[in-house]
Image (spheres, rainbow, N blue to C red):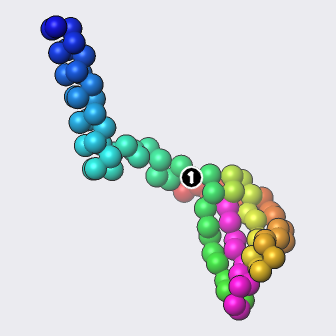
Amino acid sequence: MTEAFAVVFVLTLLAATVFLLRRHGLSRMGTRGSREIEMIERLSLGPNHTLHLLRVGGQRLLVATHNSGCTLLGNAAVEEHKQ
């Protein structure tokens, strides 16, 4: 009986820890600033037509979105500026 109580106690403790971490946002630690895709700029050209400048890894992508979907217009390597 004491082993069953110990298992229930540990599972309850684990559930409470997960709940508290999610509530306080600590479960996402380390993910900020490490995104692989970043939107640099967006330009609306009219209803349902938008240009998006994205940084994906070491590339910049210019993507157009429209009624029919999206189109890759161009890409270029991103130069890193170290300070």
Q: From the image, tell me which residue sits under label 1.
A: 35
Q: Where is 61 relative to 82, above or below?
A: below
Left or right for 29, reference 80: left
Residue 64 visible here: no
Which image quarter: residue 55? bottom right
Q: Residue 32 or 7: which is nearer the viewer?
A: 7
Which image quarter: residue 78? bottom right
Secondary structure under badge 1?
A: loop
Residue 19 visible here: yes
- Measuring 28% from the left and 33% from the top, which residue is drawn there? 15
Q: Where is 15 relative to 7, above or below?
A: below
- Measuring 76% from the left and 65% from the top, which residue is drawn there? 61
Which image quarter: residue 81? bottom right
Percent coordinates x, y for residue 24 in the rendering: 27, 50
Q: Quadrant of the C terminus?
A: bottom right
Q: Residue 2 or 67: which is nearer the viewer?
A: 2
- Measuring 37% from the left and 43% from the top, which residue is drawn there? 27
Q: Residue 83 or 46: which is nearer the viewer?
A: 46
Left or right for 20, reference 59: left
Percent coordinates x, y for residue 65 in the rendering: 75, 76
Percent coordinates x, y for residue 11 in the rendering: 27, 25
Q: Is residue 83 magenta?
A: no
- Looking at numbered disc 1 in the image, what kind of residue is underneath it? Arg
- Measuring 78% from the left and 71% from the top, which residue is drawn there? 70
Percent coordinates x, y for residue 76 in the rendering: 80, 63
Left or right for 32, reference 68: left
Q: Main secondary structure of the magenta part?
A: strand
Q: For the view shown, which residue lies furthest in the front direction?
A: 1
For label 1, the crowd category at 10 Å Cα-Cα, with few meaning under 14, some 14 to 19 and many 20 or more, is: few
Q: Is residue 54 magenta?
A: yes
Q: Quadrant of the N terminus?
A: top left
Magenta-highlighted residues: 46-55
